[in-house]
Image (cartoon, helix red, strand yellow):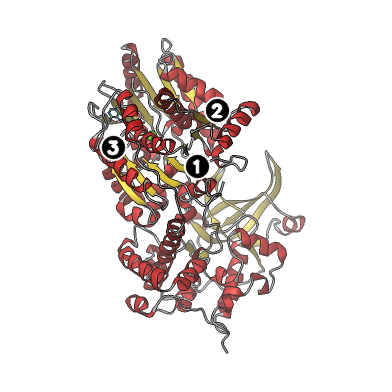
Amino acid sequence: MSGSADTLARLPVTSLSGVGPALAEKLAKLGIRTVQQLLFHLPSRYLDRTRVQPIGALQPGISAVIEAEVRAADVVYGRRRSLVCRVQDNTGTLTLRFFHFTGAQKQRLTRGARLRCFAEARRGASGLEMVHPEYELLADGDNKPLAQSLTPHYPTTDGLTQPRLRSLTQQALAMLERYQLEELLPERVRKTLDQIPLAEALCLLHTPPKGVDLQQLAEGIHPFQQRLAFEELLAHQLSMLQFRQGIRSQKALPLHPAPELQQEFLTQLPFNLTGAQARVSTDIQNDLARAEPMLRLVQGDVGSGKTVVAALAALTAVAANKQAAIMAPTEILAEQHRVNFSAWLAPLGIHVGWLSGKLGQKARREQVADIASGRAQVVVGTHALFQEEVAFADLALAIIDEQHRFGVHQRLALGEKGARGECTPHQLIMTATPIPRTLAMSAYADLDCSVIDELPPGRTPVTTAVISDQRREQIIERVRAACGEGRQAYWVCTLIEESESLEAQAAEATADNLKEQLRELRIGLVHGRLKAAEKEAVMSAFKAGELDLLVATTVIEVGVDVPNASLMIIENPERLGLSQLHQLRGRVGRGREASHCVLLYGTPLSRNSKARLKVMRESSDGFYIAEQDLELRGPGEVLGTRQTGQMEFRVADLQRDGHLLDAVREAGELIINRDPARASAIVERWLGGRERYLGA
Ligand code: ADP
Ligand code: MG
């Protein structure tokens, strides 16, 4: 029996047994609304539940099955009430910890009960523990069979357990016998992929049978995974091509070059444009003069002078009596742009508007009014520009700085700001994170690209030293000496945890410590937990030379420009990606003084970390560093989590599957041109459940 080909794509998850409205809602959070979407919700990894491990052999960070007897179980009233269970086998003891538990659960987990548990072992206060393990009670002499195949582990959401997801997926897989999954790849594309049927590939990945090559599977190079990876990459490619086609089919107002205004602007600058700046500006001018919207990415290493290029583009809009907006990812950066743009443009009689989250009610209302009336010709701001109440009189150009901080397509929301009339604004995206070519192809398939591949003259390269924190005292003396000579320094604190408050605490402690040791220096502190106004105050004091040393978290990473700062200490640089380190280091080396960067690493350093820090010591070429970073860490990390909106793959891995990209691109062009309906079906299948473009 076989249903119509796209039945599974239309069958809601509620048609599975046991799925009511509450569960459906949870599934929807994962982008799963149909049975097909459930089938395409693929495991992120596999767990081995085919054997029981002795407690004595458990390793932190590794999931395992254990069988043990409960020795004691108590409800503990700490910061959070929890049920704590000590269990034991003949090789050791282990703590089980439950923060959520029912009375019935507590009753069953009494002394003497035998359990089979499964979870990741973690280091706890008193030895290894498992938090919220999956468990079952074993009756005496009970010999329950262990798993025969690897256990898939799915990305999930609060309140949706792995066993629940697994059993639902099994139900969905069983449906594959009755309903076909439509093959969407055209025949000639499938030929290159061993003709592996889609349904078979999905079955294998959800339930890897005995005998499957585990190593291949773990590495993601199993032919069945590659079959799916190809289709997934293709879906992403098609989605971007569609997006691009959509934009390109809209009309934009041609903005013609305004040589006089430009000349006036350039003459008042204290420097000449570099060749690269001039070339990229020409690219932009050419785009702007066309009646279709520009979609251009400008990549330029830290300090290559992207801001001036942005200002030139904005001038072109102003000359046509239209508005330009420039958005920066942080208050600090936006503020810096505001200062620069005002200084450059006010003398030309251009009014620069300003919108940030920290504006007071009244100021904000005034700014919003200026934007709406067109009095603000150039508007600088943070993501506050996205907000609904912000309506531009006539936005012709949207510039987004340091794009990698935003979601890949968050820029769209700003683009749409001007789209109320019949014209769509031109879009210029600027990033200092050099994007390795393999990534550029897929993450930015929809953008034209220009590179500012030359630094302004007169920069002295930053000397980088890699030093163990055992020599901390020595480094502190170095800071004392540099500041004693009237120079300024950064001291950057890093933290592994994704917690802003922990990071802030650590930075505070470091600052206190340094104040203690460097009593004669004026020391400031910025971190993400400060109020915007406090941050601003510290930054501008540092900029004005009223502080000698700035202790900071990585909030200073992007774009901050203080030429007199010529020394930077980065603590625990091994915790950061190379591109991020490169960004940070770019804060020094902006003036005439020879600049130094000290990477003060914690010991012991892994071999990989050593290799990475060596790259930093030896190179100051952002592209080379990014390529190395990609090689040593992988693309998810390189692009940063914010960007994963589009880049989060189910099976594909850009680095591993880079060899597929040429074929993917070719297939993409073929399908989008010959069979747009098929293109939509592929995109829908892989990306349909997700929010495709991040809005405000
Ligand atoms: P980024 O590309 O990192 O955004 P900025 O636009 O902040 O770089 O420029 C870094 C510094 O270089 C600024 O102080 C800027 O005024 C200066 N600058 C930009 N272009 C030139 C140039 N052609 N010659 C000299 N200095 C320049
Ligand atoms: Mg910049």
Q: Secondary structure at mark 3?
A: helix
Amino acid type at circle 1 is: Leu
Q: Name the residue beneath numbered marker 3.
A: 277
Q: Name the residue beneath numbered marker 1.
A: 395
Mark 3 C-beta to ligand 1 under 8 Å: yes
Amino acid type at circle 3 is: Gln
Viewer-nearest residue: 517 or 261: 261
Above/below status of 245 relative to 507: below
Above/below status of 638 relative to 594: below
The quadrant of the rendering that contains the N terminus is bottom right
Q: Name the residue beneath numbered marker 2.
A: 532
Above/below status of 309 relative to 49: above
Expressed as whole percent of the image width and height from the top left, the position of residue 179 reads 56, 82
Q: Secondary structure at mark 2?
A: helix
In the rendered structure, which disc, 1 or 3, sits on the residue that comes first in sequence? Answer: 3
- Whether label 1 touches label 3, CB < 8 Å: no
- Whether label 3 touches label 2, CB < 8 Å: no
Q: Residue at x 46, y 78 (%)?
A: 183
Expressed as whole percent of the image width and height from the top left, the position of residue 600 reads 34, 30
